[in-house]
Amino acid sequence: MLPEDDRPPPAWLGDVSVGVDAWTQRAAPASDQGESRGPGDGAPRSGRRSSGRRQSGRRQSERRRPGTPPPPDAVAEGPPADPEAVARKILLDQLTGQARSRKELSDKLAAKAVPEDVATRLLDRFEEVGLVDDEAFARSWIASRQPGKGLARRALAQELRRKGIEDTVAREVLDEIDPADEETAARALVRKKLRTLTRVDDATATRRLVGMLGRKGYPPGMAFSVVRDELAAAGREEPDPGFD
């Protein structure tokens, strides 16, 4: 054996980390060293990690996918809503600030899947108390459409029919229209449109004005009479008699 002074220095001399490793390996029991260095030790650890990954995968698969709604909570949702109470609220909301025909309200309830018997019973009740009144609705509709849109009786009758107003009710209300008011509305339409026809000849202007009044529901006789008078008042030539 070489004297202590002649022995070569340890490999880890000058490197603290190597020295620590050398010291811990010497101090550890052989069984621990085998477990830490043995080739078989990696397999169990790998197996445990694999098992952990499988468990984690199962947990992730059990989670809700993004965008999917949570399962219904029967306690939070409470008992099913009363169909009649739901229908009553729909009707009151629809009638807030605006009159509506019975057909409009019936269509709205049907769209909300309200049972037909419930809808009929509530609409009958609303009619009894005056909250639904097709005749009053028709009068209100005419009062808003005739001055604003300048619609004549024929056009108003078509609109009321689309709203579900019965023909007998519509005729009764339309008969209340003053013919003088209808003619006044026609003249106002012609004067407004005539301001945009300064660059066209009189025959073209007449044709366009009479066509406009026809689309508003005015009969041909009244339409041409009004157009002829308004063209004359504007200082334009009298249109071709063939339009009469």
Image (cartoon, rainbow, N blue to C red):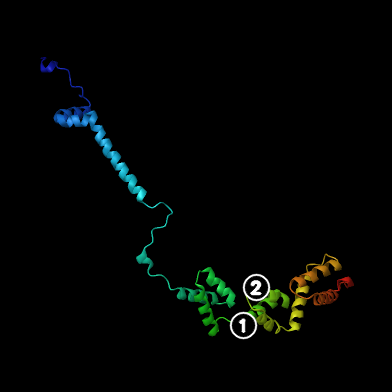
- Which element carries disc 1, helix, strand or loop? helix
Q: Looking at the image, which is closer to me, 110 or 229?
A: 110
In the drawing, does residue 109 fall left or right of residue 136?
Answer: left
Residue that sits furthest to the front in the current view: 117
Q: Which residue is mark 1?
A: 136
The x and y percentages for residue 140 are 63, 80
Q: Would you say 21 lies left or right of 236 here?
A: left
The quadrant in which residue 231 appears is: bottom right
Q: Quadrant of the N terminus?
A: top left
Look at label 1 and name its amino acid: Ala
Question: Could you tell me residue 86's position as x and y percent?
Answer: 47, 73
**Distance between mark 2 and mark 1 Cα atoms:** 16 Å
Callout 2 crowding tier (Cα within 10 Å): few <14, some 14–19, many ≥20: few
From the image, tell me which residue sits under label 2: 162
**Which badge, 2 or 1, is on the more N-terminal residue?**
1
Task: Please indicate, yes or no, whether residue 129 appears anywhere in the rendered image.
Answer: no
